[in-house]
Amino acid sequence: MFKYAFDLAETKSPRLCFISTGTGDKQVSIDAFYTAFADSAVQTSHVALFDKPNVAEVSAHLHSQDVIWVDRGSVANLLAVWRIHGLDQILRECWKSGVILGGESAGSLCWFTGGTTDSFGEVQAYADGLGLLPFSNAVHYGDRRELFHASIKNGELPDGYATDAGAGLHFEGTDLIAAISDRSKAGAYHVAKTSDGEIHEVALEVRELKRSA
């Protein structure tokens, strides 16, 4: 997935910033990030907000990146903290300026209007995302399919997309360009409410990425 993002950035030495607000900026996650790219040409950095920002000029730092990657964790908590610190607007500006935004689990869900989350305990619909992508999103779809369908059917969530573990969605602006995966049999789906109020699910064609040597 990272190589896919770096290819989009069209640079041999991409600047990659890691944001792990959703886990409370656990040091173990930050250390693992740096270790993963230690022997590569990737220029790594991170932005932490607990217990205070580790970067003096957060906006300038994020705008200077090629790729920003958001870690898993609690999407409700990360969005609340981002909004207090103004990262919601900063990241929107980065997106508009062409910085590549990505992430997994909560780091995928956050860019959409809403989706399904266990941030509050039991999995439930959540419709307070950043809304860069005007759709709903269901990660961990194998466990959340029934709830996702019901939430779209009853109007809690708009039509949207869903992914199995290992699958991802590539958007340019708000246009879906491709569904990709880093493992076999990881699916991606479009889920929408029909004019008669029923749910229509379509499996998307998924491109399986080749692992780097």
Image (cartoon, grey):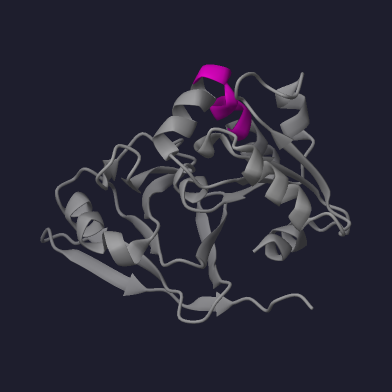
Along the line of sight, the residue nearer the viewer: 137 or 92? 137
From the viewer's perspective, is residue 47 above or below residue 211? above
Q: Which x, y percent locates residue 161?
A: 38, 59
- The magenta region covers 84-91
Magenta segment's dominant SS is helix
Hey, which residue is sitting farthest bottom in the picture? 184
Q: Is residue 90 magenta?
A: yes
Q: Which x, y percent locates residue 74?
A: 43, 39
As drawn, is 17 to the left or to the right of 116?
Answer: right
As drawn, is 93 to the left or to the right of 162?
Answer: right
Along the line of sight, the residue nearer the viewer: 55 or 62? 55
From the viewer's perspective, is residue 112 above or below residue 209? above
Residue at (12, 58) in percent of width and height:
197
As drawn, is 164 to the left or to the right of 88?
Answer: left
Q: Is residue 178 magenta?
A: no
Q: Quadrant of the C terminus?
A: bottom right
Q: How many marks?
A: 0
Along the line of sight, the residue nearer the viewer: 30 or 80? 30
Q: Which x, y percent locates residue 53?
A: 67, 21
Hey, which residue is sitting farthest left in the picture? 196
Q: Quadrant of the N terminus?
A: bottom right
As drawn, is 132 to the left or to the right of 114?
Answer: right
Hey, which residue is sitting farthest front in the picture? 28
